[in-house]
Image: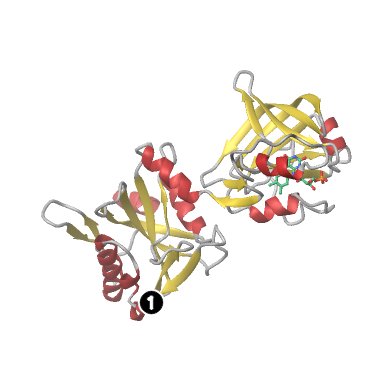
Amino acid sequence: MSNLDWHAVSAENTRSLRNVFGTFMTGVTVVTAWDADGIPRGFTANSFTSVSLSPALVLVCIAKTAGSLPVFSEAPRFAINILGDWQRETSNAFAGRSANKFEGVELLASEPAAPCLADSLSVLCCARHSLVEAGDHVILIGEVLRYRSSVGSPLGYFRGSYVDFAEGARAIQVERGSALKVGCLIAHDSGLVMVREPGCEHWSIPEVFWRAGVSQKAVIEEVFRRVGMDGDVSFIYSMFAEEGDDFARLVFRGDARDGVAAPLSRSLEVRVFHAHEQPWRLVKGEYTVSMIHRFFTEREADAFGIYCDTADGGRIAGIAGQPVHWLDWKHQAQ
Ligand SMILES: Cc1cc2nc3c(=O)[nH]c(=O)nc-3n(C[C@H](O)[C@H](O)[C@H](O)COP(=O)(O)O)c2cc1C
């Protein structure tokens, strides 16, 4: 379609208009409710819109052909589960007509009013406010009663495909001046976990932007979630800003608790590198190269230090012994 031509809307050919609607990028939600028999029902919807803050109202449009329309027309409560970019499979599952969409889906025990998907980026628990007929859809308006939100990038949807929003989110963070990236050197047996973005030549350590209002614990969890691993951090390892970058880096040292599982984004490559592969040659940036080289050298010697960039070229403070749990330390100090 040339962007200079106008097209008359035609009832026979809705495909072309549908494609144009698809140029409006959205997030993706799964709308859920209990039916009259206490069975959870849900469907994928990108027509979600926030409507009003006071009172707190949201809307979602349900096709009149949707199997679950009668349930959502009747249910006094429903939930809008806003999906994160690790939930593509969930979006696909709830866009189908299968009777057991909830199989293997963990629900939040803390919210009995509607079946809420535990793994969602955010959840809005709503009371049915009103239903408005609108062509081949019904607009379901809800009043938000309670909500919860975690960290992570949203699942995006554009022109009928999912969009990896993480890169866009990066640009937004930098623009807003919240330019601190938190990364982690995740030790895995004798190796180091590294990631590579699709189409990127270089490997890097897993890292995410640290947004205002997010706790350190949550941001570390997000870093581990990126590579689909559980683990712990032991201490801060390095602080620096690479030349030309508009953000600084705060890097922790950590350990993976289990094997490489499914990474957050399926397009992200995740691999464990060992010293003989000289992985510091595969990364970009002078500081990053030395940091990874130092990691392997120190690991060999089993003696770690903390690097801080200073005017005279940086300092490393050595750390003696293994990290001690805070409660044990407190106990010893008393
Ligand atoms: C990304 C995406 C967004 C969707 N958005 C909507 C929507 O806003 N409203 C709707 O009625 N269907 C939407 N659908 C289609 C429904 O999810 C699909 O028709 C589903 O089968 C309905 O489930 P049900 O028949 O069990 O009610 C969407 C599907 C996808 C993949």
User: Residue pushed farthest front?
Assistant: 5
13 vs 311: above or below = above
- Location of residue 284 (image quadrant): bottom left
Q: Is residue 224 left or right of residue 279?
A: right
What is the x, y in percent for residue 292?
30, 67
Quarter for ligand 1? top right
Hey, what amino acid is under mark 1?
His
Residue at x 84% of width, y 44% of height: 39
Label 1 element class = loop
The answer to whether 21 appears left or right of 331 in the picture is: right
Residue at point 42% right, 66% down? 194
Residue indicated by mark 1: 274
| Side (left or right) of 329 relative to 269 | left
Residue 66 position in % (x across, y down):
83, 42
Report whether residue 309 is seen: yes
Q: Is residue 215 visible?
A: no
| 7 on left or right of 211 | right
Colouring rule applied to residues? secondary structure
Identify the residue at image location x=75%, y=40%.
Answer: 32
Horizontal and vertical percent position of residue 118: 65, 47
Q: Nearer the viewer, residue 33 or 198?
A: 198
- Which residue does the image show at 31% across and 52% down from the upper left? 249
Crowding near the residue tagged with mark 1, few <14, some 14–19, many ≥20 C-alpha atoms within 10 Å? some
- Which quadrant of the structure image shows residue 254? bottom left
Taking the view exactly as shown, the residue that stands out farthest to the bottom is 276
Q: Is mark 1 within 8 Å of ligand 1?
A: no
Residue 34 image point, x, y percent: 81, 39
Q: Between residues 298 and 182, which one lies in front from this camera angle?
A: 182
